[in-house]
Image (cartoon, helix red, strand yellow):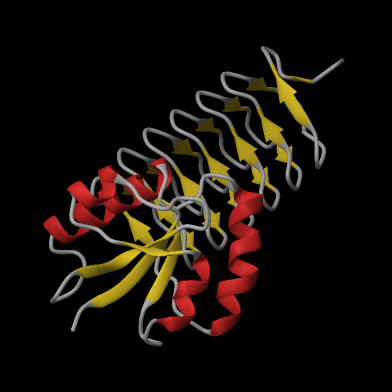
Amino acid sequence: MGQRLVVIGAGGMGRCVLDVIDAINAAGQGGDAGIEVVGLLDDAVASSDLLEARGVRLLGGVDALDELPADVGYVIGVGDGVTRRRIDVTVGAGGRSSPVLVHPNVHLGRGVTLGDGTIVCSHVSIENNVTLGRHVHVNQNSTVGHDSVAADFVTVSPLVAVSGGVGLGEAAFLGTGSSLNQGLQVGEEAVVGAGAAVVKDVPAHTTVVGVPARPIGS
């Protein structure tokens, strides 16, 4: 029997997770029997033609996970890290496995460590000695430089460029097309706006935008 799991989140990110799983199975990297998606869970989405068209069932809300066999693992296909953390506090306590999903065309350098539930989408490059925590999302066409560390629930949006030696605090969010200079620190739950060029450390719970990036209102 192959690996069985549910995807929590039936929106756009959830469908991106399905694409990663499809690619893993097509490349024969999902084990002898591949990864079987039992279904999707979402508290806010009642039905989805996009899911049904690809033959994936929406099983109900997140609580429906309790009704599934213990061997069914989970990944969280929700773009916001704070929300992923809230979901994981609930479902992660049940002892279910949460596999790492890496698209087959991703480049991983030497010494890369990926935490449980982390998802790395297509055409990403992660260089050597990088550590990503639990349930981190690295989206399409992004780069993460050497010796960088991302804490749990960090979100790296598409086309982000993270230079070497960067530290990302828990549930930090990097918007599409943003860039971070070498050695910077981004605090817990900080938000980097789309297209921002970060040249200074970003304190926790702070939103920065622009080129160079500055806190909103400054």
Q: Please, which residue is most extreme toward the front here?
A: 46
Residue in the picture at 59% in, 34% down: 174
190 vs 51: above or below: above
101 vs 181: above or below: below
Res 108 seen here: no
**Percent position of residue 20, x then y:** 28, 51
Q: Is residue 7 left or right of residue 57?
A: right
Q: Nearer the viewer, residue 87 or 46?
A: 46
Residue in the picture at 30% in, 41% down: 122
Q: Please, which residue is most extreme toward the right here?
A: 218
195 vs 79: above or below: above
Q: Nearer the viewer, residue 109 or 61?
A: 61
Residue in the picture at 39% in, 75% down: 73
Specify the quadrant of the image occupied by residue 155.
Answer: top right
Q: Nearer the viewer, residue 83 or 30?
A: 83
**Percent position of residue 49, x then y:** 27, 44
**Percent position of residue 50, x then y:** 27, 43
Q: Please, which residue is most extreme toward the bottom here?
A: 70
177 vs 29: above or below: above
Q: Quadrant of the C terminus?
A: top right
Res 121 seen here: yes
Specify the quadrant of the image occupied by residue 24.
Answer: bottom left
* Picture mark count: 0
Q: Is residue 69 left or right of residue 131?
A: left
